[in-house]
Structures are given as structure tokens and as C-alpha cells.
């Protein structure tokens, strides 16, 4: 898949940065098999994170202003779309009517401060979206039977968008990576050495909740990689299935046959193990056979969560989860979803049950308007540690030098050059 190597020219010293909460439509070129989208007009809104103190708000120039610049490919909007938080309505809908519809559709999606002190500072480009954009995606299994302070982050993904805004990269951090977790006053955690997955747990204790878990995870990833973030999302896997169901099915490729560690079939119906153990009927294991096919929500989600029985364990699971996100993004951008109001409403309702977002206080509708007329770019999937175990002898993973260099390249917005010089980090497409 293509990796763009061109870079945005440096901003003149005299230019005034527009507000992070200001966005405009830009034109983009389609890559590979992404569909073209209809051209629309720009919408502008302003806002900022009220509680972070990171200086995310500012004053932008309007059309014809000295520093006006059109964002070309607003992939931040595409990220929220990936998780069902942002979708376009039909291109024939009037702008005013569209904004009302979008506000209503997204009103059920919870938003919170998930980054805290790990937000980008003004010096790092946190005052606007003109430069590179880095997002933290956390997958959790917060079922109703589990308390909020008994949750770990099983999936930790950094989504990097270069300053050119013409590509997006997914990088996973192994859940068992040994990390230094900072002290966190909100949950009364004193700091220490732990697995990456446990950082979320420590932040959620003593009333920290899911937002506290995400904030401590963001601080931990920042300490590990040096990357600060523009936004974040918590994805509840139990609700994620409903988003996929709202999309219908999604295409997935199974590389290795694997028996499910989480589900069984009872009289042909899939059930979680704890439910299946209580049910009566003919029980059979769920086995994911090799090959590419359309998957329903339960199957796609279950497959992407497997690590036991896979040759490279969590590393293979990371690739499968990245594949899941990419498949959902493509399906969500398809015309069949964008022009079906019923599907859109079901998708938004499902998103409200599965997501907590941190958009830096920017109205979701603002990002949707920036997305109109922009062709969907490809998501490039990258492998940490070459997709192989890198244990330290204590049952924990470490980051190999090449992976540390990869995250440094993200921080410095030179990931495209790094990939060209180190093509082995690219994950297989199927």
C-alpha cells in the first residue's frame, strides 16, 4: 500500500495559527479502493477544552484572512467516523438541516477529558490542527458485571496523521509491555513498574473511573514514547459489536485458524463462555477458519480479540485489531451507509453505547463539515517489534530499538521516511 513521503512546507514565521476548533473543507485524492465522496461546503465552529489548561482554544482567520489555510484531509474526523462517532448525511441535505441532524445523532455519545496532562502543549502544536495529529485509542472490556475500577486496557493503539494530512498510520503497543507508570493523584496511585494494560486499572481506582484510567494510560504512553496527544477514544468492546451490526457485516481475513477463548456456540447461537456455561443445549467451540469473508459483529469482534493459540500471541492480535478498524472505516465510508438515514441512526445509537471521546472540546459537527468532499485515505497498519515476542525474562515485553525509533519518528512527524527506510514494519495487508 502506498506511503506518502511528501511533507507540508514550513509555516511562515509571520503566520497566525487558526483555532483548533476551526476547520474547513479541503480536497483530497482517493487512494486504492476507497470511494470518492461528494463535494460540500465548509462549516466552522469554535470551542476548546474547558478543563485541561493546555491552550487549545484561539482565534482563527476567516476567508481571505492573512493566515487562512484550508486543511486538506481532516483525518481526525475520519477517526471518529471509524468508531461510529462521526458520519456524514446525504450530500443533498441542506447545511443547516445537516447540522441539526448531526447534533441530534451524536448527542448520545459521551465525551470526557481522557488525556489530562498528556495533551499536546501549544509548543507541540496543540493550539491547532495544522500540523501532525496523534490520537490514542484504548479498547476495554467494560461489561455490566464488571466495576469501572476493575477494567484494564487490552488494546492500546496510536493513530498518527502526518502534517500533510494525506495518510493515517496505526501503531499498537503490546499490552504486556513493561512500563513506568507515573504517580497519579486522582486515583491516589503512587507510581511504579507495571504492564501497559495495568496503567488503565491503576488510573481507574479510588473514583478515578474510566476517564482517570485513560488519563493515566495517556501519561504512561507519553513517558514510554514521548508522544503527546490531540485526542483520544475509549472503545467498549461489548458495545463495539453493535456498531458492526449497524454496519451490517465487515470483510475480515483470518490468517491462522484459531479456537475462540471467549465464546461457544449453543444450539448454533454464539454466547460468551460465562453465559454458555449456564445454558442448556448442544455446545460446540467457536473456531475461526482461515480465509477472507464477510463477518457479522460477534464473529469479527471475537476473532480480533483472540491471542491464545496464535503463533505470535498478542502481536498477531494487534494486527487483527488493526484490520478490524480498517474494515470498519471502509464500510462506514461506503455510500450504502452514508445515504441510509436508518443505518446512520442505528450506528449513532450503537456508538453512544460503545464510545467515550475526547475531541478537545471541538463540536463533532465541525469535523463532519470538514470531511465533506474529502476522499477517504488509506490506513497503513504497522507492526511493533516486527510482530514477534521481545520478552525481558520477567513475563513482560519490551520495545526493540527499531520500535523505539518508530515511535520517535511519530513524535518528530517523520514516520513516512522511517517506513521507507524500514519497510519491515509494515503489517501484511491480508
Image (cartoon, grey):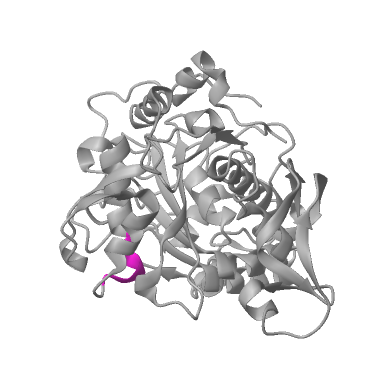
Pick whichever, 23 or 231, lies toward us.
Answer: 231
Q: Quadrant of the C terminus?
A: top right
Residue 211 is inside the magenta segment: yes
* Magenta highlight: main SS: helix
Which residue is found at the position 35% from the left and 56% from the top? 198
Residue lying at 19% horizontally and 59% vertically, measured from the top left: 184
Res 223 quadrant in image: top left
Q: Is residue 366 left or right of residue 46?
A: right
Q: Residue at x 66, y 27 (%)?
A: 1
357 or 301: nearer the viewer: 301
Q: Position of residue 28 (x, y in %)?
A: 60, 35
Q: Is residue 183 left or right of residue 208?
A: left
Q: Kindly tell me whether residue 256 is visible in this rendering.
A: yes
Q: Which residues are magenta?
A: 208-214
Horizontally, residue 230 falls left or right of residue 277, namely: left
Name above or below for residue 272 compared with residue 64. below
**x, y percent for residue 346:** 66, 73
Q: Quadrant of residue 151?
A: bottom left
Amino acid at each position: 500500500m502506498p506511503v506518502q513521503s511528501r511533507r507540508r512546507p514550513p509555516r511562515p514565521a509571520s503566520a497566525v495559527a487558526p483555532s483548533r476548533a476551526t476547520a474547513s473543507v479541503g480536497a483530497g485524492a482517493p487512494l486504492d479502493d476507497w470511494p470518492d465522496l461528494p463535494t460540500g461546503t465548509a462549516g466552522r465552529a469554535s470551542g476548546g477544552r474547558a478543563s485541561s489548561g493546555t491552550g487549545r482554544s484561539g482565534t482563527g482567520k476567516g476567508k481571505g484572512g492573512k493566515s487562512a489555510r484550508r486543511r486538506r484531509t481532516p483525518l481526525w474526523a475520519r477517526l471518529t467516523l471509524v468508531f461510529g462517532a462521526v458520519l456524514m448525511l446525504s450530500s443533498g441535505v441542506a447545511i443547516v438541516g445537516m447540522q441539526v441532524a448531526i447534533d441530534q445523532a451524536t448527542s448520545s455519545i459521551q465525551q470526557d477529558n481522557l488525556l489530562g496532562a498528556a495533551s499536546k502543549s501549544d509548543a507541540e502544536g496543540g493550539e491547532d490542527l495544522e500540523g501532525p495529529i496523534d490520537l490514542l485509542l484504548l479498547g476495554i472490556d467494560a461489561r455490566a458485571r464488571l466495576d469501572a475500577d476493575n477494567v484494564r486496557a487490552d488494546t492500546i493503539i496510536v493513530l498518527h496523521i502526518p502534517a500533510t494530512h494525506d495518510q493515517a498510520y496505526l501503531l499498537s503497543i503490546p499490552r504486556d509491555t513493561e512500563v513506568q507508570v507515573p504517580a497519579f493523584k486522582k486515583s491516589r496511585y503512587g507510581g511504579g513498574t507495571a504492564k501497559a494494560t495495568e496503567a488503565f486499572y491503576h488510573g481507574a481506582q479510588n473514583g478515578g473511573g474510566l476517564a482517570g484510567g485513560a488519563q493515566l494510560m495517556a501519561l504512561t504512553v507519553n513517558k514510554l514514547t514521548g508522544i503527546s496527544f490531540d485526542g483520544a477514544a475509549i472503545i467498549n468492546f461489548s458495545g463495539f459489536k453493535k456498531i458492526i451490526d449497524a454496519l451490517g457485516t465487515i470483510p475480515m481475513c483470518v490468517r491462522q485458524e484459531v479456537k475462540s477463548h471467549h465464546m461457544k456456540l449453543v444450539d448454533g447461537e454464539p454466547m460468551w463462555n460465562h453465559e454458555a456455561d449456564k445454558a442448556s443445549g448442544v455446545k460446540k467451540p467457536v473456531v475461526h477458519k482461515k480465509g477472507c469473508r464477510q463477518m457479522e459483529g460477534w464473529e469479527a469482534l471475537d476473532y480480533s480479540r483472540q491471542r491464545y493459540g496464535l503463533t505470535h500471541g498478542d502481536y498477531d492480535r494487534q494486527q487483527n485489531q488493526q484490520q478490524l478498524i480498517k474494515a470498519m472505516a471502509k464500510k462506514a465510508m461506503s455510500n450504502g451507509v452514508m445515504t441510509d438515514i436508518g443505518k446512520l441512526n442505528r450506528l449513532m445509537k450503537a456508538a453512544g453505547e460503545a464510545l467515550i471521546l475526547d475531541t478537545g472540546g471541538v463540536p463533532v459537527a465541525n469535523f463532519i463539515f470538514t470531511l465533506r468532499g474529502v476522499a477517504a485515505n488509506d490506513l497503513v497498519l504497522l507492526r511493533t517489534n516486527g510482530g514477534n515476542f521481545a520478552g525481558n525474562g520477567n513475563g513482560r515485553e519490551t520495545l526493540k530499538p527499531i520500535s523505539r525509533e518508530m515511535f520517535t519518528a511519530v513524535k518528530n512527524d517523520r514516520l513516512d521516511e522511517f517506513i521507507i527506510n524500514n519497510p519491515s514494519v509494515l503489517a501484511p495487508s491480508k
